[in-house]
Amino acid sequence: MFGDMMGMMGKLKDTQRKVEETRKRLDTVTLEESTPDGLLTVEITANRKIKKIQVDDSLLQDKEQLEDYLILTLNKAIEKATQVNETELAAVAKEGMPNIPGMDSFFK
Protein backbone atom coordinates (compact mmCIF):
# COMPACT_ATOMS: atom_id res chain seq x y z
CA MET A 1 0.00 0.00 0.00
CA PHE A 2 2.82 2.43 0.86
CA GLY A 3 4.44 1.72 -2.51
CA ASP A 4 1.18 2.49 -4.28
CA MET A 5 0.91 5.78 -2.41
CA MET A 6 4.49 6.74 -3.33
CA GLY A 7 3.83 5.82 -6.95
CA MET A 8 0.67 7.90 -6.96
CA MET A 9 2.49 10.88 -5.43
CA GLY A 10 5.20 10.60 -8.06
CA LYS A 11 2.60 10.49 -10.81
CA LEU A 12 0.86 13.56 -9.39
CA LYS A 13 4.16 15.49 -9.27
CA ASP A 14 4.84 14.50 -12.87
CA THR A 15 1.36 15.66 -13.85
CA GLN A 16 1.92 18.96 -12.05
CA ARG A 17 5.12 19.45 -14.03
CA LYS A 18 3.34 18.66 -17.29
CA VAL A 19 0.54 21.12 -16.47
CA GLU A 20 3.12 23.86 -15.88
CA GLU A 21 4.88 23.01 -19.14
CA THR A 22 1.54 23.14 -20.94
CA ARG A 23 0.75 26.54 -19.43
CA LYS A 24 4.09 27.87 -20.65
CA ARG A 25 3.47 26.42 -24.10
CA LEU A 26 0.01 28.01 -24.21
CA ASP A 27 1.73 31.40 -23.84
CA THR A 28 3.18 30.79 -27.30
CA VAL A 29 -0.10 29.68 -28.90
CA THR A 30 -1.77 32.69 -30.48
CA LEU A 31 -5.32 32.93 -31.73
CA GLU A 32 -6.86 35.61 -33.86
CA GLU A 33 -10.39 36.97 -33.90
CA SER A 34 -11.68 39.58 -36.33
CA THR A 35 -14.91 41.41 -37.02
CA PRO A 36 -16.79 40.07 -40.06
CA ASP A 37 -15.74 43.12 -42.10
CA GLY A 38 -12.10 42.80 -40.97
CA LEU A 39 -11.93 46.33 -39.56
CA LEU A 40 -10.77 45.13 -36.13
CA THR A 41 -8.51 42.19 -35.32
CA VAL A 42 -7.46 40.90 -31.90
CA GLU A 43 -4.54 38.55 -31.28
CA ILE A 44 -4.61 36.65 -27.98
CA THR A 45 -2.63 33.79 -26.44
CA ALA A 46 -4.29 30.59 -25.29
CA ASN A 47 -3.58 31.85 -21.75
CA ARG A 48 -5.91 34.80 -22.48
CA LYS A 49 -3.27 37.53 -22.77
CA ILE A 50 -4.02 40.17 -25.40
CA LYS A 51 -1.01 40.50 -27.71
CA LYS A 52 -2.21 42.85 -30.42
CA ILE A 53 -5.24 44.88 -31.48
CA GLN A 54 -5.40 46.21 -35.02
CA VAL A 55 -7.95 48.92 -35.78
CA ASP A 56 -8.75 50.15 -39.26
CA ASP A 57 -8.51 53.94 -39.53
CA SER A 58 -12.16 54.17 -40.58
CA LEU A 59 -13.23 52.99 -37.11
CA LEU A 60 -11.49 55.93 -35.50
CA GLN A 61 -14.21 58.19 -36.88
CA ASP A 62 -17.00 56.31 -35.04
CA LYS A 63 -16.28 55.89 -31.34
CA GLU A 64 -19.49 53.97 -30.62
CA GLN A 65 -18.89 51.45 -33.39
CA LEU A 66 -15.27 51.01 -32.28
CA GLU A 67 -16.37 50.34 -28.69
CA ASP A 68 -18.99 47.81 -29.86
CA TYR A 69 -16.45 46.06 -32.09
CA LEU A 70 -13.92 45.91 -29.27
CA ILE A 71 -16.39 44.39 -26.84
CA LEU A 72 -17.67 41.77 -29.29
CA THR A 73 -14.29 40.83 -30.71
CA LEU A 74 -12.47 40.71 -27.38
CA ASN A 75 -15.21 38.53 -25.87
CA LYS A 76 -15.05 36.12 -28.84
CA ALA A 77 -11.24 35.99 -28.63
CA ILE A 78 -11.31 35.32 -24.88
CA GLU A 79 -13.93 32.60 -25.35
CA LYS A 80 -11.86 30.92 -28.07
CA ALA A 81 -8.68 31.13 -25.96
CA THR A 82 -10.49 29.74 -22.91
CA GLN A 83 -11.71 26.73 -24.90
CA VAL A 84 -8.19 25.93 -26.12
CA ASN A 85 -6.74 26.49 -22.64
CA GLU A 86 -9.27 24.29 -20.85
CA THR A 87 -9.06 21.51 -23.44
CA GLU A 88 -5.26 21.38 -23.30
CA LEU A 89 -5.02 21.51 -19.50
CA ALA A 90 -7.82 18.97 -19.02
CA ALA A 91 -6.07 16.54 -21.38
CA VAL A 92 -2.82 16.80 -19.40
CA ALA A 93 -4.59 16.49 -16.06
CA LYS A 94 -6.67 13.51 -17.17
CA GLU A 95 -3.58 11.75 -18.52
CA GLY A 96 -1.84 12.02 -15.15
CA MET A 97 -4.72 11.12 -12.87
CA PRO A 98 -4.78 7.74 -11.18
CA ASN A 99 -7.58 5.48 -12.35
CA ILE A 100 -10.24 6.22 -9.73
CA PRO A 101 -13.76 5.14 -10.72
CA GLY A 102 -16.01 8.13 -11.36
CA MET A 103 -13.18 10.69 -11.59
CA ASP A 104 -13.17 10.73 -15.39
CA SER A 105 -16.46 12.65 -15.37
CA PHE A 106 -14.60 15.69 -13.98
CA PHE A 107 -12.47 15.99 -17.14
CA LYS A 108 -15.16 15.97 -19.85
Image (cartoon, grey):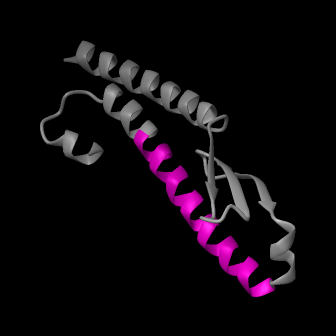
Instruction: Describe residue 9's horizontal placement relative to residue 33 as left or right.
Output: left
Q: Give the range drawn in magenta.
A: 63-87
Of residue 77 and residue 35, the one placed in the foreground of this image is 35
Q: Where is residue 66 in the image (x, y as percent from the top left)?
A: 75, 77
- Figure check: 17 above or below 86: above
Residue 82 on the magenta segment? yes
Of residue 103 and residue 39, the one placed in the foreground of this image is 39
Q: Where is residue 38 in the image (x, y as percent from the top left)?
A: 68, 61
Q: Position of residue 72 (x, y in %)?
A: 60, 72
- Figure check: 99 above or below 60: above
Q: Which residue is drawn at 62% across and 66% down?
A: 73
Q: Which residue lies furthest to the top in this view?
A: 3
Residue 107 on the magenta segment? no
Q: Which residue is drawn at 58% across and 44% down?
A: 46
Q: Position of residue 41 (x, y in %)?
A: 71, 58
Q: Quadrant of the N terminus?
A: top left
Query: In which quadrant of the rendered view does residue 64 lie?
Result: bottom right
